[in-house]
Amino acid sequence: MFDHSGKQLYLICGPTDMRKGTDGLSAIVNLQHVCDSYESAMFIFCRVAMILIRVAENETGMTWHRIEKAMSCITAGAIGSGGYTSWMTSDITAEAAEIFEKLKITPPQNVLSVEKNS
């Protein structure tokens, strides 16, 4: 696994010739004006995204369409009350919980944060 703490993750979609190497791929990113500093960013090119989709399908035994549909039910939003704003997620369905478990991913907490309004 890569340590991506403190870094922005970018998904670069579209056809990408991975034979271009680091210099060629960084030129593609630079042409797209994605970010100012490569040190604070990590890039996932579309081929990697497709591999991740296949891994998710194989680990869960589900199609990508079914995984996406189950996970799209998870939403996040803010609720303000009594001088505080609470950021919360929706309840996770049994199917989504099963996907998280099979992929060994910790599901998001229901309460993400509580902030005092200024």
Image (tube, rainbow, N blue to C red):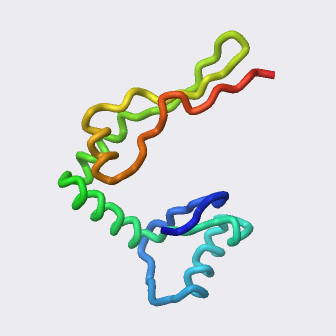
Front-lying residue, 95 or 76: 95
The outermost residue toward the left is: 61
| Of the pair 55 and 103, the residue shown nearer to us | 103
Left of 106 or right of it: where is 68?
Answer: left
In the image, taking residue 31 as reference, residue 95 lies left or right, namely: left
Image point (59%, 19%), residue name: 79
Pinpoint residue 44: horizontal percent, then vertical percent: 49, 68
Viewer-proximal residue among 23 and 100: 100
Q: Position of residue 24 (x, y in %)?
A: 57, 86
Residue drawn where x is 44% and y is 83% of the image: 17
Q: Which residue is drawn at the image coordinates 68% and 72% (left, top)? A: 38
Q: Is residue 71 above or below residue 91?
A: below
Left of 34 or right of it: where is 111? left
Above or below, comparing residue 99 to residue 41 in the picture:
above
Up/down of 102 relative to 86, above or below: below
The image quarter in which residue 8 lies: bottom right
**Residue at (59, 67) in percent of width and height:** 42
Q: Position of residue 16 (x, y in %)?
A: 45, 78
Locate residue 52, reporting x and y percent. Answer: 35, 64
